[in-house]
Every structure is written in structure tokens, then in C-alpha cells.
Amino acid sequence: MPTSTSRVVQRPVDKAHIRKMAVAVGFDAVGFTAADISTTPGDRLGEFIAAGRHGDMDWLEQKADRRRHPNALWPDARSVIMLGMNYGPEQNPLAFTGAPDRGVISVYAQGRDYHDVVKKKLKQIARDLIGEYGGDVKVFVDTAPVMEKPLGERAGLGWQGKHTNLLSRDFGSWLFLGCIFTTLEIVPDDTAEGSCGSCTACLDICPTQAFPAPYQLDARRCISYLTIETRAHIDRDLRPLIGNRIYGCDDCLAVCPWNKYAKAAKEMSLHARAELVAPKLADLVKLDDAAFRTLFRATPVKRLGRNRFIRNVLIAIGNSNSPEYTPEVTSLLEDSSPIVRVAAVWALGRLATSEQYSRMREKLIEGETDAEVRGEWELSKGKKDEQA
């Protein structure tokens, strides 16, 4: 939720002073733009939603009118201070991609939840800003209907690359964005200029081909959407393409050549926790709700919930080609959550022999009350004995 504070007294704003304030609390990039930006970002959002590329992220459609322009969200805003916090990884994010015994968690989710980290620092700057210059302010991290990436480009922090994320000359693809809307009049910085040239590395590496064209994303095929945002069952044709990615996907970010300028994050709370760097699938699949909450305390993963997370783990297990997981998968065929049971049936069909699969199907399908789980039992077959 935004934070708003006000003071009557105002005096001319010293941008250099604000930059020092921001750097002092831990931000790595600071820029300024007018709130009255063009309608182009909002038009592109409208096209994205009209094409249905937002999937079941209904909140994007419901809040589109407020998101399309800063003044649609807050008419009194005159300026926007954009702030970036580097979360560059200490090791190659793709190092464990495809490892049959490990799950890959996106870099941003391996440490403390950035919403909490960034918002706390934004509030501190906002308090100091009001104390120095007066005016009203509202602070936002990306849970609010704000188009941070176009604003970041306007404020000179970087430009949107072909993967649709903000690219920075200093930090590559690894910037968390936060913003402060204010009634103060602040001279804007120059819009960032940058180019991806003829490079298509981010488009080419995408496992699910989620980019219909450069600078366009179809979220319905994006692994980050599939493993984090959607509450539905993941389409069967996309499950094999997810590989062992169990929360998000860094492929398009990690492969970008601009990352040669990136640096490891300075903010210690954003550093990866050792137990979240490629954790073992055999340990994760056994998590009940309490153990899930304990392991992922204070991280973005906790907000996903145990059931959808186990769904993701089961898909990774199904892609492992490792029959030794069959007992763990079998134990989840009668889980209380249908979203877990569907994934467990699918994984069993990928790992068990046709005889093993048929035996479990005959045992459980009669008592199955969920239509989608029953449908999964009918679609999966199990591996042929000679291939097992």
C-alpha cells in the first residue's frame, strides 16, 4: 500500500542532495521524471490486456485505468523519483539449470523479500524529503498499480530491453525498482538512451518461447507467470519446458550481454540464503505447510503458498527422468490439494512404468472427486516398461 505524508512549507529541491540521501540508505540508482509522462506506456498496456497476454492476472485488467498514467493514480503528483536497488547475483543463475536433483529459484527470491527491503528505505527517504522540502508524497513498490519500467526509463535509470525488463549500463538486468510520487516540482533528468542492437540472446534462450516479438511478452507462456502468478493448473504442453525451475525464471535476464557491467548486490539482506540456492528436490517435495513457511520465511516464495510450490516441485521431478522419486510422488497422489494431486499424477506418469502407473490409477481414480485430477489420470500413461 502507498504511504502518504504532507507538510505545508516547501523550498526549491536540490536533486544532488536527494541522490545523496538515497545512496546513504542503500539505493544504487536515482533518477527524476515528471509525473505527466506520455500515454504511450498506457496504450501498450491496453494492447497487452486486449490480446489476453496477462493470463489470469485479473488485477492487471481491473486496475489498468489507474496504472496507465501516474496522474491517473494520483492527480496531484507533479514529479516522480525513481530508485533502483542492485540485486546482482554472486554466482551464475543458470549454473543448476537442468540438474535432475535440484530446483532452481529465481535470484530475486533467494534472499529477503525485496518489497519489505525497498519499501522501508523508500519511507525513510520520503520522511527526509518532507522534512527538507515539504509537499506530499506516496511511495510504491511493484504491488501498486504503477508502471515502474517506463518511469525508470524516463528518469534515466535504464531502458526496456527486448525481454521487456529494465536494462542498466551499470547493473545489467539486476535492478529492483521503487518510486516516490510527490507534489514537488523537480527538474526531470534526461530519458535513458540505450540499445539492444541486433542481439536476441534473451529471446532465443526462453524455454517456452514467451516473446511473440522483441519488446513483447506473452505472460501466459512465461515461466515466472506459470510458477508464481497463475493459480490454475499449468498447461500440459508447457510442463516439460519448465525443466527444474520451481520459482520464477532468470534465463532471459542472466544471458543478457549488458550483465558484464553488473555487480554483486551490496545490500546484505538481498544476498542469497545458502539453503535456497538450488535446493534438493527430494527435500522440497516432503514439505508440509509448516515446514514450507519455516524454510521460506521473509522471502517472496512464502507468498506463493505450499500447494502451488509443491506443484512446481512435482513438475521439476517429472522432468528429472529419475524414477527414484516415484515413492515421494506416490505419497502425494492423495494430497488434500487438487493442484498438488494433478501435478503428482503427471509426474508419476513421467517416472513410473506403465504397470506401476496403472496399478495406482486403478487404486485411486474411483475415489477421486476432482474432475481435473480424474482427467489427468486418463491423459497420463506411465513409461513403457522397456524404457523405465
Image (spheres, rainbow, N blue to C red):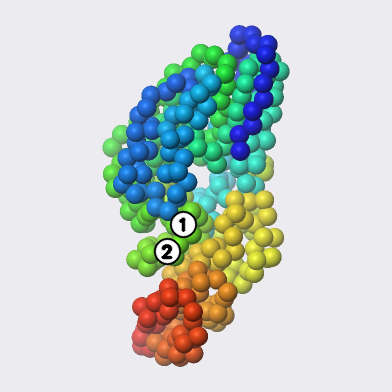
* Quadrant of the rendering where the C terminus is positioned: bottom left
Q: CA distance from mark 1 to mark 2?
A: 8 Å
Q: Name the residue at 48% across, 19% down.
A: 34
Q: Residues within 10 Å of mark 2 (few under 14, many from 20)?
A: many
Q: Is residue 36 left or right of residue 265?
A: left
1 and 2 marks in contact (CB < 8 Å): yes
Position of residue 372 relative to residue 274, above or below, is below
Which sits in the foreground, 35 or 156?
A: 35
Q: Is residue 36 left or right of residue 336?
A: left
Position of residue 176 relative to residue 366, above or below, is above
Residue 337 visible, this orientation: yes
Q: Quadrant of residue 153?
A: top left
**Considering the numbered disc 2 on the image, is that residue within a helix, a strand or a loop?**
loop
Q: Name the residue at 28% across, 37% down.
A: 198
For residue 19, which numbered disc appears in the image?
none
Q: Position of residue 266 (x, y in %)?
A: 63, 37
Residue that numbered label 1 is attached to = 230
Residue 96 visible, this orientation: no
Residue that numbered label 2 is attached to = 234
Tell me which amino acid carries mark 1: Thr
Tell me which amino acid carries mark 2: Ile
Q: Quadrant of residue 167?
A: top left
Q: Position of residue 294 (x, y in %)?
A: 69, 60
Q: Position of residue 330 (x, y in %)?
A: 53, 81
* Quadrant of the rendering where the N terminus is positioned: top right
Which sits in the foreground, 370 or 332?
A: 370
Q: Name the residue at 34% across, 33% down.
A: 43
Q: Name the residue at 43% across, 73% down.
A: 372
